[in-house]
Image (tube, rainbow, N blue to C red):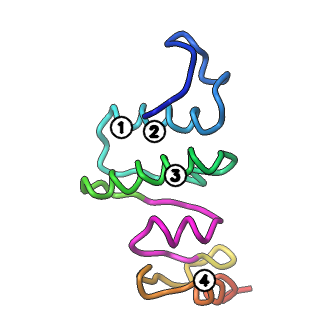
């Protein structure tokens, strides 16, 4: 997981945000679940840690895991997904294939029920 800490006795709360996220991922992976649901998995962490978490998410998908990511960061969603469900005012406004969409369409769908 490339977690940076002083030793195994370090409290998770003493780690950086990115390292805390990686510890949480490690705990999930240890249980070998088939479905992951992540809410803002990279909020508040540095770019390097984001990249590592994106790699973990992509590798889990390649292993056949189902991954649901909730994120307000459009580049993140466009970079790590196959399909995107867009919500507008609490309603599903559309589901699109990532390779066939762009930011404009996602913004249009996000404003559909305002």
Which residue occupies 60% across, 50% down? 42
Q: Are marks 1 and 2 in contact (CB under 8 Å)?
A: yes
- Marks 2/3: CA distance? 14 Å
Residue 95, x across and y down, in percent: 46, 82
Q: CA distance from mark 4 to mark 3?
A: 21 Å
Mark 1–mark 2 distance (CA, rounded to whole Å): 6 Å
On residue 103, the disc is: 4
Quarter-wise, where is residue 98 in the image?
bottom left
Secondary structure of residue under mark 4 = helix
Q: SS of the residue at dot 2?
A: helix
Q: Which residue is mark 1?
A: 29
| Residue at 29% over, 39% down | 32
The reply to whether callout 4 and callout 3 are in contact (CB within 8 Å) is no
User: Per the image, is 72 magenta?
Assistant: yes
> Would residue 38 appear left or right of 33 to someone viewing this image?
right
> 22 or 49, which is in the foreground?
49
Chain part drawn in magenta = 68-86
């Amino acid at each position: 997981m490339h977690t940076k800490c002083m030793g195994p006795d370090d409290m998770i709360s003493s780690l950086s945000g990115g390292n805390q996220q990686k510890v949480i991922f490690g705990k999930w992976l240890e249980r070998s679940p088939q479905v992951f649901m992540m809410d803002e998995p990279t909020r508040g962490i540095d770019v390097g840690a984001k990249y590592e978490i994106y790699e973990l998410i992509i590798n889990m998908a390649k292993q056949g895991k189902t991954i649901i990511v909730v994120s307000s960061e459009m580049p993140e969603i466009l970079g790590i997904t196959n399909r995107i469900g867009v919500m507008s005012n609490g309603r599903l406004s559309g589901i699109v294939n990532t390779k066939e969409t762009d930011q404009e369409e996602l913004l249009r769908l996000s404003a559909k029920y305002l």
